[in-house]
Amino acid sequence: MRPFATWSERVSRCLTLALSAALLATACRSQRASSPADAKEIIGWSRLGSWSGRGNLQTETFTSETGGFRVTWETRNPLRPGAGTLKVTFRSGDSGNPIIEAVDAKGVDHDIEYVGDRPRWYYLTIESMDVDWSVIVDEPIYGETHK
């Protein structure tokens, strides 16, 4: 028996070792990739505030952790048919500058708007004329479930 392998035997062993390592790495990657596939992303909603009235309103300040919002709004009971306006604006809780115009509606209507900026302090100005209104602001909460 020879104590040393020939050059071709060493090359052959190195190639076999490299190929085995590549196959093992691919198998490990495939295993890791399948684990997140078992996870399902879910979105919940956290209520930041809800307001209703007739006429104008400035809300208290609230903070946002995500900067994303779901605004559910409705107008009803117009002073006369076809009358009424509703405008909802997110403003900076620090400067008061307008950040997002979320709703600009006329007449009787309802909808859900999805808007966003960045995490910070906000407050709303709600401008309304000749209709009753309601506004709900929720923030998304992201998570995932696993099998």
Image: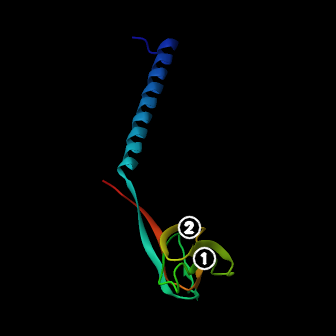
Please tell me which residue lies in front, 119 or 133. Answer: 133
Q: Secondary structure at mark 1?
A: strand
The residue to which callout 2 is attached is 115
Residue 5 visible in the displayed image? no
* Amino acid on which disc 2 is placed: Val
Confirm or deny contact between disc 1 and disc 2 (CB under 8 A): yes
How dense is the environment of label 1, judged by Cα within 10 Å: few (below 14), some, or many (20 and up)? many
Horizontal side of residue 19 vs 89, given as left or right: left
Q: Position of residue 97 (x, y in %)?
A: 69, 78
Residue shown at 62% from the left, 71% from the top? 100
Residue shown at 39% from the left, 11% from the top? 1
How dense is the environment of label 2, judged by Cα within 10 Å: few (below 14), some, or many (20 and up)? some
Q: Position of residue 147 (x, y in %)?
A: 30, 53
Q: Secondary structure at mark 2?
A: strand
Please tell me which residue lies in front, 16 or 90. Answer: 90
| Between discs 1 and 2, the one toward the N terminus | 1
Q: Position of residue 39 (x, y in %)?
A: 37, 53
Horizontal side of residue 72 vs 57, given as left or right: left
* Amino acid on which disc 1 is placed: Phe
Residue 7 visible in the displayed image? yes
The residue to which callout 1 is attached is 90
